[in-house]
Image (spheres, rainbow, N blue to C red):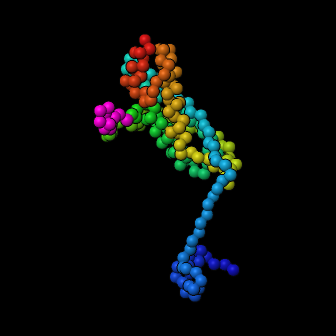
Amino acid sequence: KKVTFGQVALTAYVPHNYPLDKLEPGLNETAFYDPTNFTFPAGTHICEVEVDPNTGVVRIDRFTAVDDFGTIINPMIVEGQVHGGLVQGIGQALLEHCVYDRETGQLVTGSFMDYAMPRADDVPDFKLGHVVTPCTTNPLGTKGCGEAGAIGSPPAVINAVLDALAPLGVKDLDMPASPNRVWQAIQAAK
């Protein structure tokens, strides 16, 4: 009436008294989970920046992200995912830019000497918050969290930069909002 999993595994792979004429040794299991619908995490990201109009340098003063990931199983992992995504998105918004040679198509920003990635001094301490609305389409009530920081932070940063530059007449700015691009936009708006 009762057998441990270890005994089942041993019997399946070391077949004493095993019906080899009817079954092959070993264990196999296949399962496929097909949810009735997708999960839909949501959130709000707010960024506050200061822009030096003389140099075009953008400094992030504060960044707040409030997300709804449904039921959170491991808060520490979720916080790490959000932090990493925020830094990735901030890098995309302010620093990271692939540049190719127009004549040869050769990537000229192929090393970290030429391609700027965010460092610790490029980001502020993040203020994170969570709202929990359990997902109704899976048994755990969870929603995705891995891309939230990287999706919400670029528009939050660029909108903050554009808000700061609006009094100077800047209406549009492509990513990355590097100091040179910001300075050029300010000069063009004069």
Give percent across and percent down for residue 113.
Answer: 30, 37
Specify the quadrant that holds the C terminus: top left
Q: How many marks?
A: 0
Report the residue at 43% width, 30% height from top: 176
Give percent across and percent down for residue 40.
Answer: 63, 43
Magenta span: predominant SS is: loop
* Nearer-the-camera pick, 119 or 93: 93
Report the residue at 59% width, 77% height from top: 8
Please indicate whether residue 94 sits to the left or right of residue 101 in the image: right
* Nearer-the-camera pick, 124 or 86: 86
Please indicate whether residue 110 sits to the left or right of residue 46 in the image: left
Please indicate whether residue 38 sits to the left or right of residue 158 in the image: right
Please indicate whether residue 174 sits to the left or right of residue 78 in the image: left
Report the residue at 66% width, 43% height from top: 132
**Can I make out residue 154 in this image?**
yes
Toward the bottom, the furthest residue is 17
Q: Is residue 54 magenta?
A: no
What span is colored magenta in the figure? 98-108
Residue 110 position by quadrant: top left
Give percent across and percent down for residue 175.
Answer: 44, 29
Give percent across and percent down for residue 78.
Answer: 55, 46
**Can I make out residue 52 in this image?**
no
Specify the quadrant that holds the N terminus: bottom right
Toward the top, the furthest residue is 190
Report the residue at 58% width, 81% height from top: 23
